[in-house]
Image (spheres, rainbow, N blue to C red):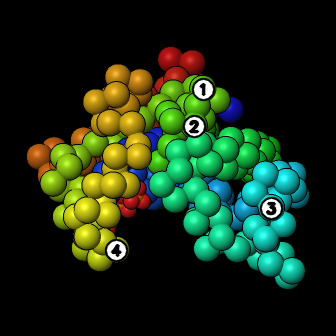
Amino acid sequence: MLKIGITGNIGSGKTTVSKVFEVLGIPVFYADDAAKRVMVEDAILMDGIKATFGRESYFNDGTLNRKFIASIVFNDEEQLAKLNSLVHPAVFRAFDEWAAQVKNAPYIMKEAALLFESDSYKMCDRSIIVTAPLELRIKRVMQRDGFTREEILSRDARQFSEEKKIELADFVIRNDDTELVIPQILALHERFLSFVNGH
Ligand code: ATP
């Protein structure tokens, strides 16, 4: 099955674009949602987190002690990298399980904010980056989440730059209000379909 990874920096519109692919009948796996789910569902990951950060990582009822984990990884690159090295393989496992259940789709997609940072793109056949200028992304996220400019900038700084992602990606969708987005999506969809059909 052809696997397409789709990413983009904060506020680029990768989720919005992925929803359009879903409308076209393409199943999309949302890795960032899955990352939250596996924290309380994947036994290997949960054991790994407890062994690395301590039993206090989870409450007795099995729910995640988010404050405790956040206090450990906040502003500590090394601890954050440790957490990611546990979470990413669990998300890969969840994706493989999900992909095995998908039937009758010409291709599937994986939407992930950290597609390139997590090496997840290496497990995809092709990759797309959704781009938009920083100021527009800031405006969108301020409207959507009510975050401050500083919060958005600090989140953006934790991701690879757009330039670097454009270099790594196979395709670019510009979601910057200068070019219509739907035709760009349809063109890529057609391209993937003909790829699958061997043309
Ligand atoms: P994040 O990484 O923060 O989750 P994202 O890349 O998934 O962001 P979206 O959630 O798809 O981005 O879009 C960010 C916000 O901008 C949303 O509120 C969305 O509705 C809006 N948005 C996205 N694209 C457009 C567009 N072309 N025109 C107007 N609003 C848009």
The residue shown at (61%, 73%) is: 67
Q: Which residue is mark 3?
A: 54
Callouts 3 and 2 close, C-beta under 8 Å: no
Left or right of residue 68, residue 8 in this image: left
Q: Which residue is mark 4?
A: 145
x and y percentages locating residue 2 in the rendered image: 62, 31
Left or right of residue 98, residue 81 in this image: left
Query: Badge 4: how crowded within 10 Å, few (<14), some, or many (20+)?
Result: few
Q: Which residue is mark 2?
A: 118
User: In what element is the residue under mark 4?
Assistant: helix
Q: Which residue is mark 1?
A: 122
Where residue 165 sits, quadrant-wise, is top left
> Would you place residue 137 above or below residue 5 in this image?
below
Between discs 2 and 4, the one toward the N terminus: 2
What separation in Å lies between label 3 and label 2 (alpha carbons)?
A: 24 Å
Between discs 3 and 2, the one toward the N terminus: 3
| Disc number placed over residue 186 in the picture, else none | none
